[in-house]
Image (cartoon, helix red, strand yellow):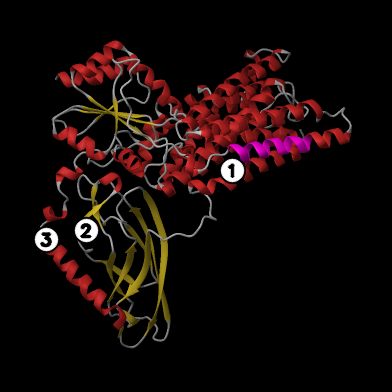
Amino acid sequence: MNRSCFLSLAASLLVATVAHSQSFGFGGAAAPKQERVTAELVAAVSAAAPGQPFQAAVKLVHAKDCHTYGKVLPPGVIGKPTKLTWTLPEGWQIEELTWPATHQVPSTDGAISDGYDGTAYLPVKITPPATAAVGSNAELKVKVNALVCDPKSCLPFVKEVALTLNVAAAPVANAANAAAFASTAAATATNEAQPAATKVVEPATTSAAAPTATPKIPLTFAQLLLYAFIGGLILNIMPCVFPVLGIKVTSVVQQAGEDRRKVVLHGLMYTVGVLLSFWVLGGFAIALNKGWGSQLQSPAFNFFLAAFFLIFALNMAGLFEIGTSAIGVGSGLQSKGGLGGSFFSGLLATVVATPCSAPFLGTALGATLAMPASQSMLIFTLIGLGLASPFLLLSLFPGLISALPRPGAWMESFKQGMSFLLFGTVGFMLYVLTNQIEGLPVLFAILSLVLIALGCWIYGRWALPHKPERTQNIARLLTFLAIAGGLWFGLPNASAKRSHAEEAVNLKDPDALHWETWSPEKVAALRAAKQPVYIDFTASWCWTCQVNKRVYSDTGLRALFKEHHVATLKADWSDENETIRLALEALGKRAVPVNVLYIPGTEEPFILDELLTVGNVTAALKKLEK
């Protein structure tokens, strides 16, 4: 398969994914619907005067049953404070004013929260400079960054609004906004007069959905950078990533006799591919407050990955070849010296690493919640460098290659052997899908992968260089139709999404732990009753989460849970869930797995290591005996 064919295949995968992704909120062509909240910048004047202050306000209009949060969250409330970032002409000054009091509002999952609904005005005082030129215009801008929630879900709201005012010799009142600013002034005065305790919602509705303390960074920044690097390094031995690293190592072995400069360039291009993808992921996580691996909450994305891994595995198994070389991930994108293949391998390594969370990695990712964007991006950079370091070191120090076997037939056997890890990854992605969708769409997804495999077989059988050109063209067409048709046939839509009901008692294993569905209200009620609470923040797409589950089958551990009457709750983040994300954020975490134990009489939860063992879970439960 030459470069153009491989790019055509990649394009067909992308087009099919985009075509179906709108059902899951990623497309931009969905039918228009009512905005949850709208923002507008209004002022008490229609013309401002030099040196004379006036009031302005951000006007938020919420749709029915929707709310946003105040400037500061009351203790115990899970949410995100509303933030206003102002951009004013040079010399213009702004003064913060007290916002109107928030009040109790219905939130997600039947909870009662504290925020604004209906129409809310968030006021400020603006003073033009005394030197402002009469007759000129001034543009005022404000960026609104908020979280808007309804009874079902929460979504980030980021919008910049602007207002242009004339500068006159004397201020001109805006009669249309007079009533609004009069009511805002009254609400602000009332809020300032109230004691602080009246602004906090009742403890019964908000206590301990997550710890009330802000995320802490107990390690120095240098230590966190080290944790990030080690976490990225450990990702290399994860089942999804190891085949990519293994094949790249064999490519270095193959190139050992070539120009050293070319080998170094391969290592650098691989590293650039890894770093670029980590910068994209980091920017996405910071800008949209998303967690590590959150793209795997989309069934469409997971199906795309399953199809991609299947094609990749069939290629490695020898069913068909990409390019003239049998060695080298991404070799179908070979350009000058195959550097494009190395770059593509770096991108691929990051994509396949996202279902995994390694030791040290969770700590480093969680710390980014309390850091400026520049420091957070440096953390993501060190994770990328850790992931890229083995291949980069082999490229920079060719002497290390002498410790590896000489090039030979073993390389093809090694490549084919690595394909079985990728076939296993396809199976894992199908397992993830069965936890996200149900019914016939599951069968369609499996059958579509068979159709995609048929397309690969056709290509490997008849699109060979020694075949007649007409035969090759027909084979390429049939391959494209089989793969594109399989993607179209198998991609799940929103109606196929599984409803996650509470886990029933396991009749085959009556001694198994009974996991109830997590909710902030359930945690609050159990803690109010002085009962220990163990919470497993997990996701079906998280490989480490699945490995952790093995400890719960230990007989001694089960006995400890029952002896101490520990309530076990599962917070399933397989699908997008803003309440779970905020609870993780309150714990200082940005990725799963996270396992915590609430001990009666202790406010702060005990957070276990990312990788569970019978020993560390037992040690946590032993704390209940003190």
Residue 335 appears in the figure: no
Front of the two marks 3 and 1 = 1
Position of the C terminus by quadrant? top left
* Residue found at x 41% / y 57%: 158
Q: Pointers 1 and 2 in contact (CB under 8 A)? A: no
* Residue found at x 64% / y 23%: 247
Location of mark 1 (residue): 17
Residue 150's spot in the image, x, y percent? 33, 52
Bin the neighbour count of mark 2 within 10 Å (Cα to Cα): few under 14, some 14-19, many 20 and up.
many
Residue 227's spot in the image, x, y percent? 40, 30
- Using the image as rendered, state which of residue 125 and residue 15 is in the foreground: 15
Location of mark 3 (residue): 194
- Which contiguous range is marked in magenta? 476-490
**Residue 394 vertical placement versus 575 (above, below):** above
Distance from disc 1 to disc 2, alpha carbons, whole Å, reads 42 Å
Earlier in the chain: of badge 3 and badge 1, it is: 1
**Residue 510 vertical placement versus 286 (above, below):** above
* Residue found at x 43% / y 48%: 288
- Using the image as rendered, state which of residue 243 and residue 137 is in the foreground: 243
Front of the two marks 1 and 2 = 1
Distance from disc 3 to disc 1, alpha carbons, whole Å, reads 53 Å
Q: Amino acid at mark 1?
A: Thr
Q: Amino acid at mark 2?
A: Thr
Front of the two marks 2 and 3 = 2
- Asked if residue 487 lies in the magenta stretch, the reply is yes
- Say what secondary structure mark 2 lies in: loop
* Residue found at x 70% / y 35%: 482
Does 190 sit left or right of 235 as displayed?
Answer: left
Distance from disc 2 to disc 3, alpha carbons, whole Å, reads 12 Å
- Using the image as rendered, state which of residue 348 and residue 88 is in the foreground: 348
Earlier in the chain: of badge 1 and badge 2, it is: 1
